[in-house]
Image (cartoon, helix red, strand yellow):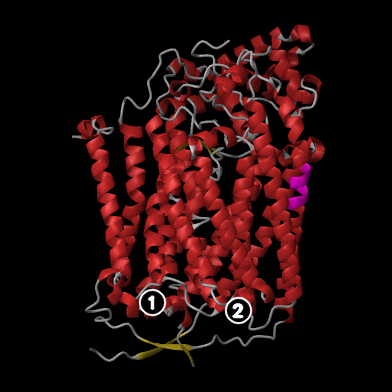
């Protein structure tokens, strides 16, 4: 064996500090936005009539801020700190680390500007428009190069389980983001996806589900495998279990996306796959939770005294609870009750607050004193934060589950005569509004708890002794060419990072390919009906307004094949009806009723006055008014360009239609406005956005013979 | 070939074979992980977080 020479090196902790501070900053912002939109659902007036503050525009900002800004910065801090130490090497490049940091913050700032402006693709957690998508790709590649560079320059042959989870995160998120973001630009701030309708829904929820899996779960599990043993100062309970946990989790997780589309127009086999694999997820998820909790064996007395451990234990407990509830909600019969209701909102917050917030908080309580070489400013404050957050989470979760199950049961209640017991949708909303106030209190408590942590961390940093400019120097033997020789099995694999990465990619690619190939190659995937026609130019304009205002955040466009749904909304939605829907607008929540067959259900004037003052038309409605649609003009000038892009994607527009798109749209707008003259609508309104939106809404669900 | 695969997508033998293949891999990895001879090596692995290099 060759001589292993001792090498000196240092860790770049400045980058870890930057990401840790950004986690605190964006966590506070993301939660504040969450509180604002929770307040708006309790009282619709709380957007103050400002279009940038409406629920439809702020809800994507909240989800993006929490997922990518708060948790994102947290995982980058945790990954850079732990990977350097586990591999006994410095970050591959200080410059790349800084590009990664500032590039990611730029993406967040761009999201915070564009989403309230209504610049969105409306795909959940992938709302950002194409220039930002490109920037995300570049910055993710920078991160990947920096990370894999550390693997290349490492001084430890074997890669610890935490690193496996980081590897799977980096390759899978890259795959998810690139595949889901293939779009054709119309302008600098608008694009249409290459996928339409059912295919768009399948790709989007493959992405959406796996954003939860590979952004909110796998990297955080990696952090758990590093920081829990470090905090408790004892190794993970079972390294063997971690091997099974890792491989089965990443293999199974990727298949489960279609559980977001149960009872939709997605083919039955894909729904069944999604459901079965979701149920299978129980096993690896609980394997991981048990592994984490048992790491604390024999040290439970310390949990009572140390806030860091309290956060970790609660995180693992909520990880177990939400990974039990997720598969439960994926069973078709349970999904039929819970889907589109607040139960799902409760579920994601038990994961988001219980798992992500708690684990991130535990990690920061471990990291920040270590990075600034000090002790936590006030341990009692950390305990206060913990109990405030836990109480807030319980109030949030319970209120949402109660609201969701209550409303779900009311939606499906049918009397002995075969009629809906609650035919008026607003009746079912009215019953759960008190729960929205309880949720608001819960959210406020969680937000307050976070501010307590920000203060505690701020004071910890402020009171820390002034640090020397020079970094600490460490020594470890260099990695020789024959390191790991004579090893076999998984241990050998852990030394072969390239092979490991390829195998991890295969594990996530299998499910993706099996679900996607038939969807994109089979002619039978969607039965095409000639009755379904592309949208008129004015309807295209109206649809883009619908997307901009985030209407999909409160209204679905998918009638499930259940008696109560057909009674309430009309004939079930068929896959063929969505072939010109780019992006698809099926939604995932019904704060208001489904809109797929709203076309022709009411007169144009109903929509006109409803958008102006919802309560005048529907007493008790919690929808905000949209007065700016009555002032802003429709952008007729862009329509030719939009139709041209849509034609390139397969929409059968003629050259004449494309050339005269603006004229055709104006004609239709004039007809709609004139028809409303009797209701007091003035002719000058014909070029306003409300008319385009009405045109779109009145077209919905009519091609196959709706009203 | 492509259309043949797609046409047989719902063939129970095809899906069963895939199931057996995946299950075999799972059992294989489990055996690998729980081999008694690996104990010492896993002990070394699980202690990696506690070795950050020697501080100079």
SS class, disc 2: helix
Q: Does A439 appear in magenta?
A: yes
Choose mark 2 or mark 1, whichever is in front: 1
Residue A70 is at least partly visible in this image: no
Q: Relative to A602, is A296 on the left or the right?
A: left
The residue furthest front is A416
Q: Does A93 appear in magenta?
A: no
Residue A137 in picture, x, y percent from top left: 46, 53
Label annotation for residue B45: 1
Whether A428 is drawn above or below A504: the answer is above
Label annotation for residue A515: none
- Res A664 quadrant in image: top right
Main SS, magenta region, reads helix
The quarter in which the C terminus of chain A is drawn is top right
Residue at image point 35% right, 75% down: A158
Q: Chain of mark 1?
A: B
The residue furthest left is B1
- Using the image as rendered, state which of residue A481 and residue A146 is in the foreground: A481
Residue A353 in picture, x, y percent from top left: 64, 56
SS class, disc 1: helix
Residue A648 in picture, x, y percent from top left: 40, 28
Residue A579 is at least partly visible in this image: yes
Region rendered in magenta: A437-443
Residue named by callout 2 = A371
Q: Chain of mark 2?
A: A
Whether A538 is drawn above or below A107: the answer is above
Residue A564 in picture, x, y percent from top left: 59, 22
Q: Relative to A466, is A233 on the left or the right?
A: left
Whether A450 is drawn above or below A677: the answer is below
Mark 1, Cα crowd under 10 Å, few <14 / some 14-19 / many 20+, is some
């Amino acid at each position: 064996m060759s001589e292993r020479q001792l090498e000196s090196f240092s860790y770049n902790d400045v980058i870890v500090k930057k990401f840790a501070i950004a986690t605190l900053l964006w966590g506070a912002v993301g939660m504040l936005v969450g509180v604002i939109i929770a307040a708006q659902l309790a009282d619709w007036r709380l957007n103050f009539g400002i279009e940038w503050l409406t629920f439809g525009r702020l809800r994507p900002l909240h989800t993006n801020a929490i997922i990518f800004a708060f948790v994102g910065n947290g995982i980058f801090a945790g990954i850079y700190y732990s990977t350097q130490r586990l591999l006994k090497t410095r970050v591959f490049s200080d410059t790349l680390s800084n590009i990664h940091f500032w590039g990611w913050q730029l993406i967040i700032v761009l999201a915070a500007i564009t989403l309230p402006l209504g610049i969105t693709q409306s795909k959940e957690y992938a709302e950002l428009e194409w220039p930002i998508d490109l920037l995300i790709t570049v910055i993710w590649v920078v991160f990947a190069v920096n990370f894999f560079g550390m693997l290349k320059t490492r001084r430890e042959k074997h890669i610890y389980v935490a690193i496996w989870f980081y590897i799977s995160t980096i390759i899978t998120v890259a795959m998810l983001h690139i595949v889901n973001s293939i779009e054709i630009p119309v302008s600098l701030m608008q694009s249409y996806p290459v996928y339409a309708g059912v295919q768009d829904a399948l790709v989007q929820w493959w992405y959406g589900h796996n954003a939860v899996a590979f952004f909110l779960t796998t990297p955080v599990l990696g952090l758990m495998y590093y920081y829990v043993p470090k905090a408790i100062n004892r190794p993970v309970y079972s390294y063997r279990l971690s091997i099974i946990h890792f491989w089965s989790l990443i293999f199974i997780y990727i298949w489960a996306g279609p559980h977001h589309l149960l009872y939709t127009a997605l083919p039955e086999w894909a729904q069944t796959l999604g459901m079965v694999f979701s149920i299978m997820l129980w096993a690896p998820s609980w394997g991981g939770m048990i592994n984490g909790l048992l790491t604390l064996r024999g040290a439970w007395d310390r949990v009572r005294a140390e806030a860091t451990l309290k956060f970790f234990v609660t995180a693992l407990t909520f990880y177990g609870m939400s990974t039990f509830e997720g598969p439960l909600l994926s069973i078709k019969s349970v999904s039929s009750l819970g889907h589109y209701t607040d139960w799902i909102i409760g579920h994601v917050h038990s994961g988001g607050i219980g798992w992500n917030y708690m684990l991130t908080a535990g990690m920061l309580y471990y990291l920040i004193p270590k990075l600034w070489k000090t002790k936590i400013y006030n341990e009692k404050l950390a305990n206060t934060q913990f109990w405030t957050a836990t109480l807030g989470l319980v109030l949030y979760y319970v209120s949402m589950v109660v609201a969701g199950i209550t409303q779900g049961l009311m939606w499906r209640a049918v009397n002995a005569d075969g009629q809906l017991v609650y035919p008026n949708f607003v009746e079912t909303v009215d019953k759960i509004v008190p729960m929205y106030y309880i949720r608001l209190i819960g959210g406020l408590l969680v937000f307050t708890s976070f501010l307590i942590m920000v203060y505690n961390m701020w004071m910890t940093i402020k009171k820390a002794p002034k640090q020397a400019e020079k970094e600490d120097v460490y020594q470890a033997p260099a990695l020789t060419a024959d390191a790991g020789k004579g090893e076999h099995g998984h241990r050998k694999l852990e030394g072969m990072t390239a092979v490991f990465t390829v195998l991890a990619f295969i594990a996530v690619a299998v499910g993706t390919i099996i679900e996607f190939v038939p969807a994109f190659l089979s002619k039978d995937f969607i039965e095409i009906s000639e009755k379904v026609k592309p949208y008129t130019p004015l309807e295209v304009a109206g649809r883009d307004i619908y997307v901009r205002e985030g209407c999909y955040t409160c209204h679905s466009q998918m009638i499930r094949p259940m008696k109560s749904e057909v009674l309430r909304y009309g004939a079930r939605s068929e896959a063929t009806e969505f072939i010109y829907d780019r992006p698809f607008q099926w939604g995932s929540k019904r704060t208001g009723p489904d809109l797929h067959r709203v076309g022709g259900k009411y007169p144009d004037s109903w929509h006109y006055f409803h958008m102006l003052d919802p309560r005048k038309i529907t007493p008790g409605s919690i929808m905000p008014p949209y007065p700016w649609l009555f002032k802003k003009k429709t952008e007729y000038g862009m329509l030719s360009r939009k139709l041209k892009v849509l034609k390139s994607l397969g929409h059968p527009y003629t050259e004449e239609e494309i050339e005269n798109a603006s004229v055709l749209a104006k004609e239709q707008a004039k007809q709609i406005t004139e028809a409303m003259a009797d209701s007091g609508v003035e002719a000058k309104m014909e070029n306003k956005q409300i008319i385009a939106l009405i045109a779109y809404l009145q077209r919905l669900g009519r091609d196959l013979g709706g009203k | 070939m492509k259309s043949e695969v797609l046409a047989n997508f719902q063939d129970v033998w095809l899906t069963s074979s895939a199931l057996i293949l995946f299950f075999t891999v799972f059992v294989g990895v489990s055996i690998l992980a729980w081999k008694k001879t690996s104990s010492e090596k896993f002990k070394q692995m699980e202690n990696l977080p506690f070795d950050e290099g020697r501080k100079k």
